[in-house]
Amino acid sequence: MNAILAQLLNGLDKGGAYALIALGLTLVFGTLGVVNFAHGALFMLGAFCAVAFRYLLTIESVRTDPTQMTPWGQPVEIKTPIVQDWFGEWGAIMVDYSVPLSILLAIPVMLLIGVAMERGLIKYFYKRTHAEQILVTFGLAIVLQEIVKSFFGPNPIPQPMPEALRGAADIGAWIGMGEGQLTYPWWRMVYLLFSLVLIGIIFAFLRFTTFGMVVRAGMNDRQTVSFLGINIDRRFTIMFGVAAVVAGLAGVMYTPLLSPNYTLGMDFLVLSFVVVVVGGMGSLPGAVLAGFLLGILQSFASMTEVKSLIPGIDQIIIYFVAVVILLVRPRGLMGRRGVMET
């Protein structure tokens, strides 16, 4: 029972990442009709926003301490982060919490990157075929990852989680199972909660704000909304930026779980597209549902008992489930009629 609950939590945590990336993909496809194969690169860029922010926070100042001498008779050099010199104890806290604080950098950076991508390249492919959209955005993804590689190098860059959130929570004691029966890493719980909150914010924005309602109307009937004198293209451009922010924030908070590497976007890209297709192209609830569903299935398939019965099942379970669902329901779990159909 404990193993099942632990795998369920693992699946929800992994599903949170899939759901966030798939949600951004679906926002772009639902508003602009563009199949964006560069979306995984946005996840990677968000992760490197966290890396860059920590670099900035850990720039060191060097001073000498005349009361301490090296064996060669020179004053000892003491290096401390500049923010710690400026803000004292608060500076040390900022360094410790660099990952969640890097959200402050990631939001404007990812918004600008998203808008620049849409205005600089994507808008020229609105009326092209999906195959052409895939080719050009896939090429863009390769360019972005090579740029990141040139700046940060080819090796993974570990990002420490805050000291207070290291270790594991005793969930078993919370639910009356006894101490030590079921533990789960604190940061994974934080990531799951963050995913749920961010998903809730996006849905609330689309449902309860005037801007969101106009966007949803434009997703259903773009021409009619334009006839009302509303610049729907500008709103869709902003939504592309919002989708980039969602992917970027997902990458930021994932860095303590998986060290950022320039190939990180490609690692998540194919899986996130499978999630979108299973959920139904253009369906936001479908993307979220499929993300968590496939995350849970992949988690259970990675159990030793399951892999001993079906070797390699953890590598193919997502694709197998996708094939079964699409055979039974070609539009996906919550896909709309007419989307991606000729």
Image (cartoon, rainbow, N blue to C red):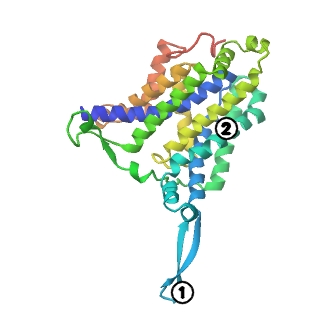
Q: Nearer the viewer, residue 111 or 23?
A: 111
Crowding around mark 2 (Cα neighbors within 10 Å: few <14, some 14 to 19, many 20+) is many
Left or right of residue 241, residue 88 in this image: left
In the image, which disc is placed on residue 2? none
* Residue 311 x, y percent position in the rendering: 35, 35
Q: Nearest the camera: 131 or 197?
A: 197
Amino acid at dot 2: Leu
Residue 150 visible in the snapshot: yes
* Location of residue 70 in the rendering, given as x and y in whole percent from the top left corner: 49, 85
Side of 250 where 309 appears, left or right = left
Q: Residues within 10 Å of mark 1 (few under 14, many from 20)?
A: few
Q: Which of the two residues, 199 or 91, is positioned nearer the viewer here?
A: 91
> Does residue 132 show up?
no
Q: Please report the residue visible at 24 percent of the width from the left and 38 percent of the height from the top.
A: 173
Side of 7 where 102 appears, left or right: right
Q: Position of residue 12 (x, y in %)?
A: 41, 32
How many numbered marks appear? 2
Q: Which mark is residue 111?
A: 2
Residue at 58% in and 12% down: 336
Residue that badge 1 annotates: 74
Q: Is residue 65 above or below residue 195?
A: below
Residue furthest left in the image: 178
**Element type where label 2 sits in the image:** helix
Across and down, in percent, residue 189 comes to: 40, 39
Which of disc 1 and disc 2 is earlier in sequence?
1
Image quadrant containing the N terminus: top left
Quarter in which the C terminus is drawn? top right
Residue under the image location 56 percent in, 39 percent down: 249
Residue 79's quadrant in the figure? bottom right
For badge 1, the amino acid type reads Gln
Q: Residue at x 58, y 73 (%)?
A: 62
